[in-house]
Image (cartoon, rainbow, N blue to C red):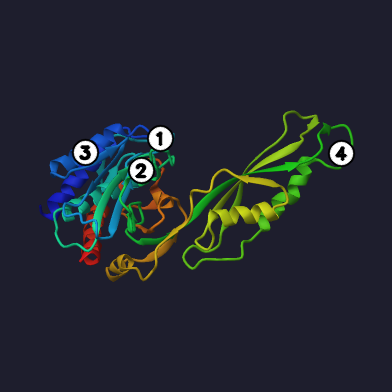
């Protein structure tokens, strides 16, 4: 099939996906639509929960494996929408609709690229296409839950909107719960150990704290206090103040290292909620990255999370659309971005796989 026709079919699929509600853990109907695409091209597939995956025709267990992955779940539309989020409309070259940019455009572009290479022989890598579920809520039935049942993956392209530039690193995330303690008392009585006053110094410590190791691609670790909660009534000094700290981790640290450092140094008790969302990276001289650079694509470090956090192999985040539109009202992707995305995916893979 000619690339132009394949692109038209991919845009048609994206319109179909937009029409279907596919909130995290409710993606069964979009999984059906993805199955229909693969069936139409006579591509065998496997479905696990709402994850759909397929292998290229000439799979060879002796070869390394390239993963192509993007997700088909969406967040719920926010209240600022002025359009029907489930009505795909093209206006002034923009395709509007929930999930069009994050990450429907990436998903259909990767599906088109996978379909283009599906029957090709003598590739130097196997190709594994995974349309995954529950990315937005990092659910148990997401790519992370699927990975134990997949073949070993050696390198990956994760489809997220990057303006088709190469995110060669991605920050990890740890959320911490911290507690600043004090002495509870009646507000009318003296109290030199007021937990709220104690919090002032703790907040200053978090504001000024710096992790020493920076990263060429991702810069410094970013630590931000994002929530604070204390007290129940005006005349009672609370026994404690609860804080939530958001830490975006560069590729110079593992999440465990960050947790160990903060537990040892923070001036209050602190506990992580989980350590599974580690940072990701790929060597700048990796053949996959070089293929993109040769086509004029830029490299950068991404501050936002994706399914890269589930992978232990080297991976690059790459896709049509703009990350700043993700989760926004009246979400859209330009038609030309999808056309360009499919073309660039195919060119990058053609160089990498031969």
For disc 4, the neighbor class at 10 Å (few under 14, some 14 to 19, many from 20) is: some
| Picture quadrant of residue 104 | top left
Q: Secondary structure at mark 2?
A: helix
Q: Which mark is residue 106?
A: none
The image shows residue 186, relative to residue 110, as above or below, that is: above
Q: Nearer the viewer, mark 1 or mark 2?
A: 2
Q: Which mark is residue 191?
A: 4
Residue at image mark 1:
76
The Cα–Cα distance between marks 4 and 3, rounded to whole angstroms, is 66 Å
| Picture quadrant of residue 320 | bottom left
Give the tally of numbered discs: 4
The Cα–Cα distance between marks 1 and 2, rounded to whole angstroms, is 23 Å
The Cα–Cα distance between marks 4 and 2, rounded to whole angstroms, is 54 Å
Left or right of residue 118: residue 168: right
The Cα–Cα distance between marks 1 and 3, rounded to whole angstroms, is 23 Å
Q: Nearer the viewer, mark 4 or mark 3?
A: 3
For disc 3, the neighbor class at 10 Å (few under 14, some 14 to 19, many from 20) is: many
x, y percentage for residue 143?
37, 45
Q: Secondary structure at mark 4?
A: loop
Residue 88 seen anywhere in this rendered image of the structure? no
Q: Which mark is residue 146?
A: 2
Do the residues bearing badges 1 and 2 touch, measured as CB atoms within 8 Å?
no
Which of these two is toward me, 150 or 52?
150
Q: Earlier in the sequence, mark 4 or mark 3?
A: 3
Q: Earlier in the sequence, mark 1 or mark 2?
A: 1
At 74% from the left edge and 38% from the top edge, which residue is drawn? 240
Residue 144 seen anywhere in this rendered image of the structure? yes
x, y percentage for residue 195?
77, 41
Left or right of residue 75: residue 276: right
The Cα–Cα distance between marks 2 and 3, rounded to whole angstroms, is 17 Å
């Amino acid at each position: 099939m000619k690339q132009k026709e394949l692109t038209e079919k991919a845009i048609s699929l994206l319109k179909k996906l937009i029409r279907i509600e596919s909130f995290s853990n409710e993606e069964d109907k979009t999984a059906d639509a993805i199955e229909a695409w693969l069936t139409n091209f006579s591509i065998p597939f496997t479905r696990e929960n709402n994850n759909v995956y397929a292998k290229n025709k000439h799979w060879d267990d002796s070869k390394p494996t390239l993963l192509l992955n993007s997700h088909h779940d969406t967040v719920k539309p926010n209240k600022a929408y002025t359009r029907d989020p489930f009505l795909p409309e093209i206006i002034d070259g923009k395709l509007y609709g929930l999930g069009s940019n994050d990450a429907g455009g990436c998903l259909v572009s990767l599906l088109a690229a996978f379909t283009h290479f599906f029957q090709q022989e003598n590739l130097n890598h196997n190709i594994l296409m995974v349309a995954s579920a529950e990315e937005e809520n990092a659910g148990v039935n997401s790519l992370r839950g699927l990975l134990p049942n997949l073949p070993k993956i050696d390198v990956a392209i994760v489809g997220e909107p990057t303006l088709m530039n190469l995110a060669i690193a991605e920050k990890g995330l740890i959320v911490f719960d911290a507690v600043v303690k004090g002495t509870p008392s009646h507000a009318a009585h003296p109290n030199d150990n007021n937990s709220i006053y104690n919090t002032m110094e703790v907040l200053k410590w978090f504001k000024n704290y710096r992790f020493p190791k920076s990263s060429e691609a991702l810069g410094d670790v970013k630590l931000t206090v994002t929530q604070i909660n204390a007290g129940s009534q005006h005349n009672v000094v609370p026994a404690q103040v609860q804080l939530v700290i958001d830490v975006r981790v560069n590729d110079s640290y593992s999440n465990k290292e960050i947790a160990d450092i903060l537990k040892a140094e923070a001036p209050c008790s602190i506990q992580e909620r989980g350590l599974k969302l580690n940072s990701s990276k790929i060597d700048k001289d990796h053949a996959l990255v070089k293929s993109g650079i040769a086509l004029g694509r830029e490299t950068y470090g991404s501050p936002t999370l994706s399914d890269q956090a589930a992978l232990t192999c080297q991976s690059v985040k790459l896709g049509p659309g703009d990350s700043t539109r993700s989760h926004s009202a009246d979400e859209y992707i330009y038609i030309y971005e999808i056309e360009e995305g499919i073309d660039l995916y195919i060119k990058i893979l053609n160089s990498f796989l031969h």
